[in-house]
Image: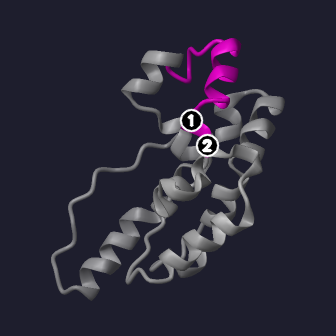
């Protein structure tokens, strides 16, 4: 699992092509991005599928969507938290009696709030993704490794 705000700020070619990279994005493009599908409960939409529109309701996403995703995650043998992915993969490799993967050092970014640089926009996006954040916070409790930070 991954912190929803960090995930949405990771961007990809489509995001950058449409809204510009986060370091050079205009205020107008930040707001367009904040209201786009890229900030609309990504994890819930992937875990619950299209049948109930859990990933399409933004701030109106129901608690039922979170419960459905939790029920699925409870069935997983291993859940890893990307915040300490290296440690999680090391532990998983040990459990599976496999050699540990070779990992590149993780990039260090400013916090999401610092990267967005607008309290109003940050709060809007946080509210829009609050159910994804709720799921992520819960998933930390079932993660193979409990992150130190």
49 relative to 127, above or below: below
Among all residues in the image, which is located at the extreme right? 120
The picture places residue 99, in percent across and down from the top left corner, at 16, 76
Rendered image quadrant of residue 54: bottom right
Range shown magenta: 21-40
Tell me the element at label 1. Answer: helix
Q: As rendered, which of 139 and 93 lies closer to the eye?
A: 139
Query: Going by the image, does 122 lie left or right of 66?
Result: right
Give the Cα distance between marks 1 and 2.
5 Å
Q: Which residue is mark 1?
A: 37
The picture places residue 111, in percent across and down from the top left corner, at 64, 42
Q: Which residue is mark 2?
A: 40
Query: Going by the image, does 79 lie left or right of 71?
Result: left
Seen at 68% across and 46% down, the residue is 57
Seen at 53% across and 18% down, the residue is 19
The picture places residue 139, in percent across and down from the top left corner, at 57, 72
Rendered image quadrant of residue 120: top right
Seen at 64% across and 73% down, the residue is 67
- Residue 15 lies within the magenta run: no
Res. 127 visible in picture: yes
126 relative to 74, above or below: above
The picture places residue 148, in percent across and down from the top left corner, at 58, 70
Q: How many marks?
A: 2
The crowding category of the residue bearing disc 1, from other C-alpha atoms within 10 Å (few below 14, some 14 to 19, many at least 20), is few
16 relative to 144, above or below: above
Rendered image quadrant of residue 12: top left
Query: Going by the image, does 135 lie left or right of 100?
Result: right
């Amino acid at each position: 699992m991954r912190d929803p705000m960090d995930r949405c700020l990771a961007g990809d070619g489509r995001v950058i092509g449409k809204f510009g990279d986060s370091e050079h994005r205009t205020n107008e493009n930040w707001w367009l991005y904040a209201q786009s599908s890229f900030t609309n409960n990504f994890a819930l939409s992937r875990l619950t599928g299209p049948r109930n529109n859990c990933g399409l309701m933004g701030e109106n996403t129901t608690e039922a969507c979170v419960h459905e995703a939790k029920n699925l995650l409870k069935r997983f043998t291993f859940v890893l938290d990307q915040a300490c992915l290296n440690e999680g993969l090391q532990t998983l490799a040990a459990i599976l009696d496999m050699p540990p993967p070779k990992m590149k050092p993780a990039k260090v970014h400013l916090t999401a709030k610092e990267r967005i640089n607008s309290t109003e926009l940050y709060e809007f996006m946080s509210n829009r993704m609050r159910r994804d954040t709720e799921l992520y916070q819960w998933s930390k409790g079932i993660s193979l490794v409990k992150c130190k930070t």
